[in-house]
Image (cartoon, rainbow, N blue to C red):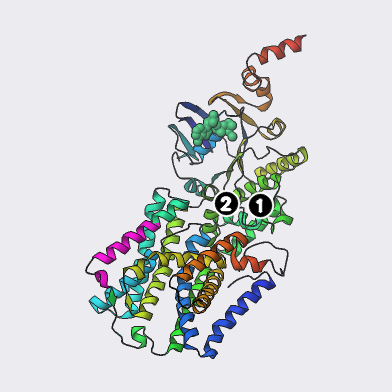
Amino acid sequence: MLEVENLSKSFGGLKAVSNATLQVPEGSIVGLLGPNGAGKTTCFTMIAGFTKPDSGSVRLRGKDITGLAPHHICNLGMIRTFQIVQPFAGLTVEENIAVGAYLHHHERKEAMAVARDVGKRLGMGTLLDRPASALTIAGRKRLELARALATGAKLLLLDEVMAGLIPTEINEIVGIIRQIRDEGHTFLMIEHVMQAVMSLAETAYVLNQGVMIAHGTPRDLVRDPAVVEAYLGHGAAQRLQEDDHA
Amino acid sequence: MMKLNSTGQLVLILVAVAYLLGVYFISSPVWMGFTINALIVAVLALSWNVTGGFGGLSSFGHAVLYGTGAYTSAILQVTYGVNAWVALVAGIAMAAAVGGFIGALAFRYGVKGSYFALVTLAFAEVFRICAASFDFTGGGSGLQLKLAPGISNIQFADRTVLYTFLLAIVVLVMLLTAWIKYSRFGAYLVAVRENEDAARALGIDTYRIKVLAMAVSGAFGGLAGVLYLQLWLFIDSSIAYGSSVSIEALIGPIIGGAGTVWGPVLGTLGLHLIGEGAKTLLSNAPGLNFVLYAVVLICALRFMPNGLVGLAGRIGPFAKKESKDA
Ligand SMILES: Nc1ncnc2c1ncn2[C@@H]1O[C@H](COP(=O)(O)OP(=O)(O)O)[C@@H](O)[C@H]1O
Ligand SMILES: [Mg+2]
């Protein structure tokens, strides 16, 4: 469904992303992992049209969308959420979700109905009339997801929707994401919470210092020395192995 | 046309309506004359409200729209003998075009916040200087319409008829404002105000929405300028494009409640009442009303961030729903 090829981006001298390639098959949940500053969010901003890549291409359902504006891309059915949540603070939860719903429902009545429906499905039924600014961090993360879903987009790029949540909240959102996927959506998700990635993603990519260092099932990845090194530092893989043998 | 959510707002609006209807019965030419002026400014305030209130695009140069409406209509009538109604439509259209043009230019280059205020101010000043210099705008001496009372010329000999006409226009512009507020366009405009990046991610062409808002605001502002012309039959560069016009455009909505339907009208009426009261008390010191406006504005920004409508909204709420409707 999504094919990213050799995407690169530099900020001044810093190569934030170099030659990143990844594929997201329709109906799957694909993880994008990597330590802080690896370039994951930068990948998302390029894929979703927020910044132009220096080189490389992005294709959605076979159509080249490299460099298209975000609103075009959203109209084509792909949407990103923000790691640093971006609610419309002065609006209610319902109004927030309705902004997304307006994309394909031009009448206020319809958009509001869709918003309420999406809100309820994501367990925000009792919060609909609350101002978005009054939500907890878990609520705000969920609102990001709800708004994105309300646009009718089929491919959702989630940027750390579980960061900062407590385990019960994580379990809830894992359940919700699985349910949304079963309804016919596809996910590419950046995630730090390994437990969540392990239970959700069929495959995952690992980015380190802008370079894609591994790709495979989450189970394989945690045993991959290169991945362990990236997360725990140089020599860590070897030390772990020695510990195992000891 | 609006969702009221408190006793306070209901009372506030009832008082305003009672006042506007009361003017018919007081039969005081002073009150009526003063309220007529306030109604024209209210249309200008509703113009600023579209961009500044809903869109968070604070202009400091709305005179450019007001003046363009007034000048377009005046030139067409004086120089080309065009009918006043046709000139009115042309004035509105031209102001909408100028608004759209300024928006297209400013937003193409990502101008935001106080820079946008400065860009609009600069446009108003350039237009003012041009209007004072060229012959076709009447140069320094301005343009004078011929006195010719009659509906076909939009000139009203009877003040009561004039007042009714202006009141109807204010109601019409309020209805259009309410329509914007509860439409997809309005929702998108507010989304742009609240968080432009999130709006873009959700499929909104934010550039188009902002340019459109400037055009709509231009139409309302141009209308206000034409109304001024039809009332006084005279304009010159500082009447049409002066910065006091731009100040009047923004101060009413801010005091009354920006991004609401009633706020700009309530704020403008309230402000003019205070200004008028002070004028009579302090025996016509010129410019004093602006000093007073500044004081009121500072107090409003400090003590009622959502304006009169926001303040009234906190008095006796109907339900626990917290939103800023009116
Ligand atoms: N707009 C920007 N300007 C300059 N440097 C940036 C910008 N965005 C990200 N970076 C840098 O690029 C690198 C990758 O950042 P990011 O993509 O946010 O990483 P991640 O999401 O994996 O934590 C970091 O070193 C970050 O400082
Ligand atoms: Mg990140």
A206 or B8, which lies in front? B8
Query: What span is in magenta?
Result: B120-141
Kindly state the secondary structure of the residue where label 1 is placed: helix
Instruction: Indicate which quadrant contains ligand 2.
Output: top right
Q: CA distance from mark 1 to mark 2?
A: 21 Å
Residue B145, horizontal then vertical, whole percent: 29, 80
Please tell me whether residue B190 belongs to the stretch shown in magenta.
no
Query: What amino acid is at disc 1?
Result: Ser
Q: What residue would you read off at disc 1?
A: A133
Residue A28, horizontal then vertical, whole percent: 62, 37
Residue B43 placement, left or right of A121? left
Q: Could you tell me if the residues under marks 1 and 2 are in contact, i.e. CB atoms within 8 Å?
A: no
Kindly state the secondary structure of the residue where label 2 is placed: loop
When the figure is inspected, residue A166 is found, relative to residue B313, above or below; the finding is above
Residue B20 placement, left or right of B93? right
Residue A113, horizontal then vertical, whole percent: 64, 61
The chain to which mark 1 is attached is: A
When the figure is inspected, residue A63 is found, relative to residue B82, above or below; the finding is above
Q: Work out which quarter of the rendered image holds the C terminus of chain A and state it.
A: top right
Q: What residue would you read off at disc 2?
A: A151
Q: Work out which quarter of the rendered image holds the N terminus of chain A and state it.
A: top right
Question: Quick one: which residue is furthest to the left in this view?
Answer: B135
